[in-house]
Amino acid sequence: MHDARVLVVDDSAAMRALFCDVLEQSRNVRVVGTAANAAEARDQIAEVMPNVLTLDVEMPGMSGIDFLEEIMTSNPLPVVMLSSLTQSGTETSLKAFELGAVECFPKPLKATPEQFAKTVGKLGKIVLAAANSNVRDKPRAKVVRAENVDSFQCNGTIAAFSASMGGVDALSEVFAQFPANCPPTVIVLQTEPAVAQAFIARANKDYACTVKEAADGAALTPGTVHIASDPGKHVVVEPGDPAVLRLVERDPVEGFRPSATLLFGSIARGGRPAIGAVLTGMGEDGAKGLKLLRDAGCRTLAQDRNSATVPQAPAAAVAAGAVDAELKLEDLATAVLSACAAN
């Protein structure tokens, strides 16, 4: 892993100073320049050659989202967008993911001092992961629904995924291949809950399957995808016919809540046929749980590290001996459907 050389782009001098201070205190992160607008940022990119940008959404002149599109079209770099968590802010975050942003980080504008310190403290790790990410060389075209999938019949196998940085983009690709009668699916998505809710709403418009926020007591039945992103609760699968989701309040597992390792482990203990996959993301969450799934005789997959936006999580799963196969995203979705299809 190489160090992050970050350019901070924000029209507020106070915010530039704040984020520079936070980042300079982060291990393996160095601020190499600042800019107040897109024009200054262009000059700074050429002069200091950063390997990652933090980019404010709202700037005078060219907006951050327009500048992101310019960057990803002409000179692709890893970009962490800084945005509010208002309704318009979360919609902008989804647009930023479509254009190629690695992550969208919330500006903690109305947080308590304790919340502020906790939230901003994550930024250094995110920027470092972004600096070591795989960046697309062009904006992704809008993903459309797969065709000719109306005949799919599920064999009762549960599909379980984990994802964090780059996860919205990766899951969009997966959902595009899912039929209306998709396998019963549960996902741990490490992102801001407001962003997850906006993503769920958009997914229900764009794709054939039904996508819902994970809820306690929800039955795992064909045709529905359940996404857990609430940082206050874990999600586990309780055996039954059908199996049901349980949201539980307990301490983070290895620093994560919801924990993909806890989700995968609950499925392994339940003895139901299942297939699990670790997609793009930072950290090691999911690796140990996926190993439990594999040891229980379930099929286990990881997104190919060379194509994952952030390869840390898939790499950790492979290193743990938890993965049957590493696959590109389009092949991974096909493999999941194949494992869940009735003969």
Image (spheres, rainbow, N blue to C red):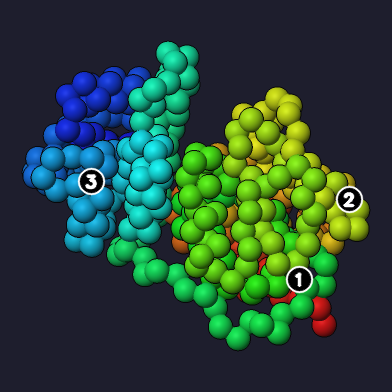
Q: Position of residue 268 (x, y in %)?
A: 83, 50
Residue depicted at 57% across the width and 66% down the height: 175
Question: Secondary structure beneath disc 2?
Answer: loop
Q: Position of residue 9 (x, y in %)?
A: 21, 36
In the picture, the quarter occupied by the C terminus is bottom right
Q: Quadrant of residue 6?
A: top left
Under mark 3, the amino acid is: Gly
Q: Quadrant of residue 116?
A: top left
Tag 1 residue: 340
Question: Secondary structure beneath disc 1?
Answer: helix
In the picture, the quarter occupied by the N terminus is top left
Q: For the view shown, which residue lies furthest in the top direction?
A: 113
Q: Earlier in the sequence, mark 2 or mark 3?
A: 3
Residue depicted at 80% across the width and 54% down the height: 219
Instruction: In the rendered view, tell whether residue 242 sits above or below residue 342.
Output: above
Tag 3 residue: 64
